[in-house]
Amino acid sequence: MEADGTFLGINNKISQSVPHLHVHIVPRRVKDGLRGFFWPRQKYESEEQENSIQEAIKRLVSSQ
């Protein structure tokens, strides 16, 4: 993802109707606007960009 760093958020039980564990892995960049656990959300420029990022993540996860 060509990030400068990574933010990891791990949630378990609090504010969940069905207790479970999930992890957020958020690529970080200098001055990206992340404040605490809340980050500015942006739409993808196109469906092609969304699919390209999805495939990149799949490749990286499956190569580990």
Image (spheres, grey):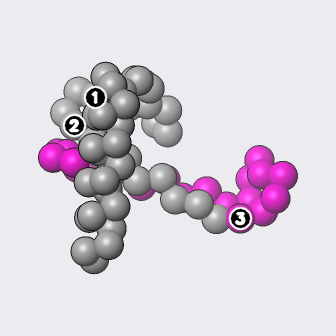
Indicate the secondary structure of the residue bearing disc 3.
loop
**Residue topped by disc 3:** 20
Q: Is residue 42 magenta?
A: no
Name the residue type under label 2. Arg
* Alpha carbons under labels 3 and 2: distance apart: 29 Å
Labels 1 and 3: the sequence-earlier one: 3
Indicate the secondary structure of the residue bearing disc 1.
loop
The numbered mark at residue 29 is 2
In magenta, the rendered stretch is: 1-20
* Alpha carbons under labels 1 and 2: distance apart: 5 Å
Which residue is outermost to the bottom? Answer: 64
Labels 3 and 2: the sequence-earlier one: 3
The residue at the point 34 percent across, 42 percent down is 51
Horizontal arrangement in the rendering, residue 20 relative to residue 37 (left or right): right
Q: Quadrant of residue 33?
A: top left
Horizontal arrangement in the rendering, residue 38 relative to residue 27 (left or right): right
Q: Is residue 9 magenta?
A: yes
The residue at the point 40 percent across, 53 percent down is 25
* Alpha carbons under labels 1 and 3: distance apart: 29 Å
The residue at the point 26 percent across, 64 percent down is 60
The residue at the point 31 percent across, 22 percent down is 45
Assess disc 1: are there few (<14), some (14-19) or many (≥20) residues with their C-alpha within 10 Å of its C-alpha: few
Name the residue type under label 3. His
Quarter containing the C terminus: bottom left
**Residue topped by disc 1:** 32
Horizontal arrangement in the rendering, residue 53 relative to residue 37 (left or right): left
Q: Nearer the viewer, residue 61 or 27?
A: 61
Majority SS type along the magenta span? loop
Name the residue type under label 1. Asp
Find residue 49 and report its horizontal and vertical position in percent: 28, 34
Which residue is outermost to the right? Answer: 17
Task: Say if mark 1 contacts mark 2, CB within 8 Å.
Answer: yes
